[in-house]
Image: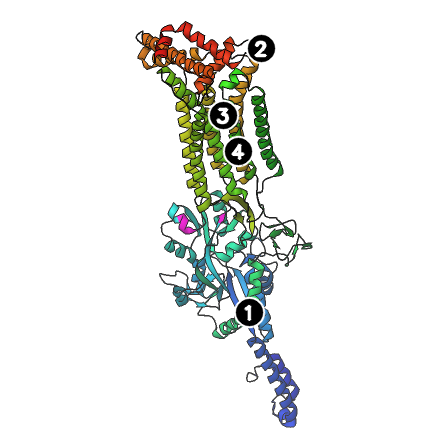
């Protein structure tokens, strides 16, 4: 019976059947065929039993709980019953639980029964659990007894393979590839361990893990906290005890799937291959078969499917979104996120399904702003026309005559040109142009400025020259032609600058992209009139205009003693101060909003409008007010000259001492004598009927002065007026008169 390896009860029954008398030989000899058939059946049953035992592979393993690689089925990690097979299928789930079930499937294909006897490892640290299957038990390096080390065939855990470990344990085939990485909170300051090391920050690492040794060796300058478990590491990270948590990238990605407050930094270093450590004491046939089925899992793409299941966001198919993936999401421009929301690839597309294209923001001037520019121009034009009509209407008024209407009209003409520069500012293009109005703007503004202020300066200079000559008893002739030449010289400088700018570096319309998506599609752009060296020309023009304003302030200071009936120095100074204040405020504002064409247009148009409107109101408003309120009084040229000479002499002597009074009186007498000479000459010329030639403005003003005092209501003839002036000279200055007659 032992030879056939048969059950003892079966053998006894066989003997009872074939051995009738008990010695056995009679039955064998009486029926040998029957005996051989029975013996063959017994041999087949023994072979089947032996083959069944050889086809069953039992693997004993200790499990390291590390989601998502190994997750306990119950809180205590035990199964619902005592069946080891049930424990392998239900007590432990996760990536490795699914892998074990797939290995069992591959074993059944090969007519094997793969059975895992799994339990929680007594040690939940990677290093201590590895010692249970190492070949150096009962040594100083490994205090576990030989009995403890023979307890498991392998450790079901996500171990990194390396050289020192390969000496102590055997490795299964690689079932995952990963790297070391870090995770942080959304508000975290550091995104890499390099930054954390430079900033002196703290990182959390799993206690006793091989990864901790690698991270500490790679970044020795950082501070570290050893946390007992991954859950503790995440908790410390959120509490702020550490800025980064370093661990396996796959494990971190799994945690970030369900925790929107954390994110994997993307930092990757030290590529690792995940294996199971296998004891060298395990039966080699068992180990070979286990490795064979693991390689089948690799070639069958089982590991790829499991990797997608546990480490990849479960998104809706392309073109769908929503919690149940039943809503549309444009496949060209968007994709569903973990919550089912359609997320557009680019900000150029919007809408719930990313199908609405966001038009490029061209930053064109709005209609209301363009309308305001035209309104500014219209207001100044209307004011200039009204002032010109009023000057023509009041051209015979004494105050208007001494204000020299010709030059007042030139000032208005300059304001019209300057205000016209607002119109080119409002021109634009939605593309790359061209916009011809770009290079017209500096011409209009510069010429308008120089004509306006150049006329005012020349007018003041003309009156100052005459009054200064009268104070020294000198005769000068300042014609309109000479004054117009002064205005032309001032304007020619601006013309030369603008001509050089236009010829060599003309302003052109250009549109620059200020914002684009990640694919280079423009989202926002701005159009400007610009050139390569526009800042240089703007600085040159600004310096020149500043010099003009400073020169005008100096003229206003020199003419401070002349009556405001003859020169608008006070109002001129007020206009220039207003001009400077506006520029000082507007320039910093333009610098701040320089990249915003809408705000820049409005500010520039308002600056031009206010400057010109202020000049019109100050210069012409004061004149209109004085004429209509009749505040001018009589026009006494001789008295004005005497006052100018007295004040000028008084200011020339410190403290206005008494020594200056005789000098002022002498100069006043000299002025009176000179006026008498001028009047005598004018009277003589008129009486002899000859051409007056170039009569000075002073003589014209004197005639106007004398007319206002002596002319009758019915306006006597010019010859009578000059004759009266002649007689006045004889009566008031007889000695000077006779001397002049002799000369």
Name the disc covering residue 483, or none: none
Query: N-terminal of the two: label 4 or label 1?
Result: 1
Helix, strand, or loop for circle 4?
A: helix
Q: Circle 3 sits on which residue? A: 407
Q: Residue furthest right?
A: 326
Query: N-terminal of the two: label 4 or label 3?
Result: 3
Label 4: how many Cα within 10 Å (few below 14, some 14–19, many 20+): many
Label 1: how many Cα within 10 Å (few below 14, some 14–19, many 20+): some
Q: Are the residues at dot 4 and dot 3 in contact (C-beta closer than 8 Å)?
A: no
Which quarter of the image is occupied by the C terminus? top left
Residues under labels 4 and 2: Cα distance? Answer: 42 Å
Residues under labels 2 and 3: Cα distance? Answer: 29 Å
Magenta stretch bounds: 184-196
Q: Nearer the viewer, mark 1 or mark 2?
A: 2
Q: Circle 4 sits on which residue? A: 417
Going 55% across and 39% down the picture, which residue do you hit?
424
Q: Nearer the viewer, mark 4 or mark 2?
A: 2
Q: Position of residue 377 (x, y in %)?
A: 58, 32
Q: Circle 2 sits on which residue? A: 714
In depth, the one of 9 and 104 nearer the eye is 104
Q: Nearer the viewer, mark 4 or mark 1?
A: 4
Residues under labels 3 and 1: Cα distance? Answer: 101 Å
Query: N-terminal of the two: label 1 or label 2?
Result: 1
Residues under labels 4 and 3: Cα distance? Answer: 15 Å
In depth, the one of 295 and 637 nearer the eye is 637
- The reply to whether residue 523 is in sight is yes
Picture quarter containing residue 547? top left
Helix, strand, or loop for circle 1?
A: helix
């Amino acid at each position: 019976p032992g030879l056939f390896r048969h059950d003892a009860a079966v053998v006894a029954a066989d003997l009872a059947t074939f051995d009738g008398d008990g010695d056995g030989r009679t039955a064998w000899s009486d029926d040998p065929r029957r005996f051989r058939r029975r013996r063959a059946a017994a041999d087949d049953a023994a072979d089947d039993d032996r083959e069944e035992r050889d086809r069953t592979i039992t693997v004993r393993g200790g499990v390291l709980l590390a989601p998502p690689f190994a997750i306990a089925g119950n809180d205590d990690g035990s199964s619902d019953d005592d069946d080891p097979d049930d424990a392998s299928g239900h007590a432990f789930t996760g990536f490795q639980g699914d892998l074990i079930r797939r290995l069992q499937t591959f074993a059944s294909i090969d007519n094997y029964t793969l059975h895992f006897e799994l339990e929680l490892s007594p040690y939940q640290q990677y290093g201590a659990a590895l010692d249970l299957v190492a070949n150096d038990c009962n040594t100083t390096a490994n205090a576990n007894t030989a009995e403890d080390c023979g307890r498991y065939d392998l450790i079901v855990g996500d171990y990194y393979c390396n050289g020192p470990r390969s000496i102590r344990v055997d490795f299964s085939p690689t079932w995952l590839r990963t790297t070391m990485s870090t995770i942080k909170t959304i508000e975290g300051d550091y995104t890499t361990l390099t930054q954390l090391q430079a900033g002196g920050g703290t990182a959390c690492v799993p206690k006793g893990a091989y990864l901790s040794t690698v991270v500490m060796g790679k970044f020795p300058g950082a501070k570290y906290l050893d946390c007992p478990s991954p859950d503790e590491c995440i908790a410390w990270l959120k509490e702020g005890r550490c800025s980064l948590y370093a661990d396996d990238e796959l494990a971190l990605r799994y945690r970030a799937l369900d925790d929107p407050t954390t994110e994997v930094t993307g930092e990757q270093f030290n590529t690792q291959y995940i294996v199971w450590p296998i004891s060298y004491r395990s039966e080699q046939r068992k180990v070979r078969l286990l490795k064979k089925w693991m390689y089948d899992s690799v070639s069958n793409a089982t590991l790829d499917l499991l990797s997608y299941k546990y480490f990849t966001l479960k998104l809706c198919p392309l073109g769908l979104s929503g919690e149940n993936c039943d809503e549309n999401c444009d496949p060209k421009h968007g994709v569903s996120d973990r919550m089912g929301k359609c997320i557009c690839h680019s900000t150029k597309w919007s809408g719930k399904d990313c199908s609405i294209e966001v038009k490029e923001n061209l930053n064109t001037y709005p209609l209301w702003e363009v309308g305001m520019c035209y309104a500014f121009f219209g207001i100044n034009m209307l004011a200039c026309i009204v002032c010109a009509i009023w000057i023509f209407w009041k051209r015979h008024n004494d105050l208007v005559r001494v204000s020299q209407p010709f030059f007042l009209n030139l000032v208005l003409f300059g304001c019209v040109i300057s205000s016209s520069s607002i119109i080119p500012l409002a021109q634009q293009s939605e593309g790359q142009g061209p916009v011809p109005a770009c290079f017209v703007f500096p011409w209009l503004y510069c010429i308008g400025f120089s004509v306006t202020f150049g006329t005012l300066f020349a007018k003041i200079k003309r009156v100052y020259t005459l009054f200064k000559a009268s104070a020294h008893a000198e005769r000068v002739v300042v014609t309109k032609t000479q004054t117009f030449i002064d205005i032309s010289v001032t304007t020619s400088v601006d013309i030369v600058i603008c001509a050089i700018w236009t010829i060599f570096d003309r302003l052109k319309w250009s549109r620059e992209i200020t914002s684009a998506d990640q694919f280079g599609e423009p989202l926002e752009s701005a159009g400007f009139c610009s050139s390569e060296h526009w800042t240089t020309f703007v600085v040159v023009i600004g310096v020149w205009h500043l010099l003009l304003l400073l020169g005008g302030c100096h003229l206003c200071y020199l003419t401070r003693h002349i009556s405001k009936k003859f020169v608008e120095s006070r109002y001129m100074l007020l206009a220039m101060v207003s001009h400077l204040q506006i520029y000082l405020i507007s320039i910093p504002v333009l610098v701040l909003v320089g990249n915003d064409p809408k705000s820049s247009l409005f500010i520039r148009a308002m600056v031009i409008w206010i400057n010109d409107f202020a000049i019109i109101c100050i210069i012409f408003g004061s004149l209109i007010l004085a004429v209509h309120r009749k505040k001018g009084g009589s026009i006494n040229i001789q008295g004005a000259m005497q006052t100018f000479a007295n004040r000028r002499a008084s200011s020339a002597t410190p403290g206005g001492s008494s020594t200056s009074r005789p000098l002022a009186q002498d100069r006043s007498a000299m002025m009176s004598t000179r006026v008498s000479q001028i009047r005598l000459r004018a009277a003589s010329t008129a009486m002899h009927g000859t051409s007056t030639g170039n009569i000075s403005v002073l003589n014209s003003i004197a005639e106007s002065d004398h007319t206002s005092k002596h002319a009758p209501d019915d306006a006597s003839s010019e010859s009578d007026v000059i004759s009266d002036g002649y007689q006045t000279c004889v009566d008031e200055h007889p000695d000077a008169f006779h001397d002049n007659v002799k000369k």
